[in-house]
Amino acid sequence: MNQRETTTRPALRALACIAIAALLSSAGGVGCKKDSAGGAGPAGSTTTESAKIAGNAIRIGVLTDTSGLYADLAGQGSVVAAKMAVEDFGGKVGDQPVEVVFSDHQNKPDVGSNVARQWLDVDKVDAVVDVPTSSVALAVSEIVKQKNKVLLASGPGSSELTGKQCSPNTVHWTYDTYALANGTGNALVKTGGDTWFFLTADYAFGQALEKDTSAVVTASGGKVLGSVKHPLNASDFSSFLLQAQSSKAKVIGLANAGGDTINAIKSASEFGIVKGGQKLAGLLVFISDVHALGLKTAQGLDLTEAFYWDRDDMTRAFSKRFAEKHKGAMPTMVQAGVYSSVLHYLKAVKELKSAADGKAVVAKMEELPTDDPLFGKGTIRKDGRKIHPMYLYEVKAPGDSKGPWDYYKLVREIPAAEAFRPLEQSECPLVKK
Amino acid sequence: MTIPPQALFSQLLIGLINGSFYALLSLGLAIIFGLLNVINFAHGALYTTGAFVAWFLLQYAGLGYWPSLVVAPLVVGLFGVLLERTMLQRLAKLDPLYGLLLTFGVALVIQGLFRIQFGSSGQPYEIPDALKGATDVGFMVLPNYRAWVIVFSVLVCSATWYVIERTKLGSYLRAATENPVLVRAFGINVPRLVTLTYGAGVGLAALAGVLAAPIYRVSPLMGADQIIVVFAVVVIGGMGSILGSIVSGFSLGLIEGLTKVFYPEASDTVLFVLMALVLVFKPAGLFGRVT
């Protein structure tokens, strides 16, 4: 009897341990790795190599996902891009040095908000950059507004950032859900895909993408038959795909991103969904996703991007330099957007000779026309929306590709004037007088 | 909403496929916990390692899926033996919490290394030619590979159960769990038994990893995504119970599948709700021994 008791007691204790561990890590989200950053608090993860340098430095904080499902499309690549922008600008604005710091927001609004607060209050960061994951970006945008600093959003997609929740301190740089819906959604409806079913990531971005695409589909005479919401970072999509299959919709719209899109496309090819006559629409597919899928699985996908490395000589030159610093990977549009937004930010700060007043900096950014090697000439609107052309691409078949990263052929350039939500339709309070 | 029976069947079948992975993973965990009293948090990372070993073998040695199914678990099993001998053994006399912390740390290191080297999007791994394609089973189109996953994992689970519950070796194992001192007095090398058990448990995780590679991507996060769910499965089944882990693995896969039909938003929380309920009403788990 005694034996028994001594073996069961640790067992029960172990049970309690597991329960605690499970709670901790599910509260901490997808896995365990983020404790390296989150546990130590934002200060621990803010890699300020030169944080001790003079207090007058201009600090750019890259807030991104360095460990989760968006780490390849943003992540360290965004940090590399920000550093390249600072370097290309000369490393200084007047006599003020420019520093780049970064942190992992783990795709969680609470973690992202904490880091942002710490950065703006204590670490004297002047601009927060990138912020993939719309829910995090919306939270950070609010904080940046309160502290009157600047948010240069390249990673997030929700068009809410320049819609109802727009802010005089935020510029939404690279793409948004409206532009994606307008590009891919429109193209598919025009080629006969007039009934849709959505697989939607259950958070701000997925919902916005579904909403915007539904609007486009309905406006062009199509019909939305239904949708299923899946958790962010779901590992198995077969169940959701079967629901989409039985809806008999002609197009299955994937209103998700990164690893979720990759898994969904992969399972769809396994379950013969495309062979069965339904078409998959990856509403947000990055080149890093295509790289991970391989052309064999990804071929034929239509997708909308703001940037492709192989577009012209200037993008090729930049991408080559970028790849050398980032393990041979070509930049995604998010990373390219980080580069171009930081460059324009520094221009505005140089004109103003100060980064102190975030609202003034953004106003200056809106006043100056944008011009850089990656996105060409453009403008920033009153609602914070950066305007440039978008591009509809089709993924090449394996036989047409000359090698790694040669993935897209251009279907259509969407001119800047049509690519984004027209200002008259905007719900942004800054626009209405 | 009304669900046609066809859709329901296919969802159940898909639940069973996911359940196969839960069962294989939780089986390894249960074996390790039963004998070593270690809560092996590195299990997910070793599952990832199994998938990566298969990918390495294909990429650098030209070994395809079938050899990997044997080689990868062996390689990872050896790594487990090393881990047990050099680190875990030293914690044997301490509170299980230390083992948990150690394996948690090991998991972070493994995951981090893979992520730094290969990025988070993962690497593609092809389905072996023999299992490509799909079969129409009446109510759904079932990919052949997924059918193979169910069959194979049922076989592995039953074989493991048989070895532990019905063979001489298994009886040593169970005896050593009950009273290591006495078993040692009969001339059985208990530390070696413990080491090999850890190796075997970890090998099962790697096997699941190889099975998963063609379905998901070979990605550094694939283990982290699974491990917490699998812990819930083990707790529900009863810590250290072999049969419990198998049965609850498959049945929780089914329950999760059903949730995805009726209320998809809850599909990643339903298992934890069940776990909480089980802990409240039957703290030792459904199949756990109560004293």
Image (cartoon, coloured by chain):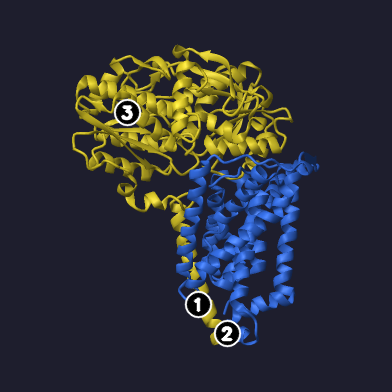
Callout 1: few (<14), some (14-19), or many (20+) C-alpha neighbours within 10 Å?
Answer: few
Q: Quadrant of residue A295?
A: top right
| Three-letter amino acid code of the residue under disc 3 | Val
**Which residue is at the front of the view, B153 or A280?**
B153
Labels 1, 3: front one:
3
Chain letter tied to yellow = A
Labels 3, 2: front one:
3
Q: Which mark is residue A326?
A: none
Q: How many marks?
A: 3
> Eyeballing the image, is A136 above or below A371?
below
The residue that disc 2 covers is B181
Gap between marks 1 and 2, in whole Å? Answer: 18 Å
The C terminus of chain A, quarter of image: top left
Q: Disc 1 or 3, which lies upstream in sequence?
A: 1
Residue A88 appears left or right of A279 = left
The N terminus of chain A, quarter of image: bottom right
The residue that disc 3 covers is A86
Gap between marks 3 and 2, in whole Å? Answer: 66 Å
Please say whether residue A429 is visible from this viewpoint: no
Callout 3: residue from which chain? A
The furthest residue to the front: B61
| Badge 1 element | helix
Instruction: Give x and y (percent) for residue B282.
Output: 56, 69
Q: Which mark is residue A9?
A: 1
Discs 1, 3: same chain: yes
| Three-letter amino acid code of the residue under disc 2 | Val
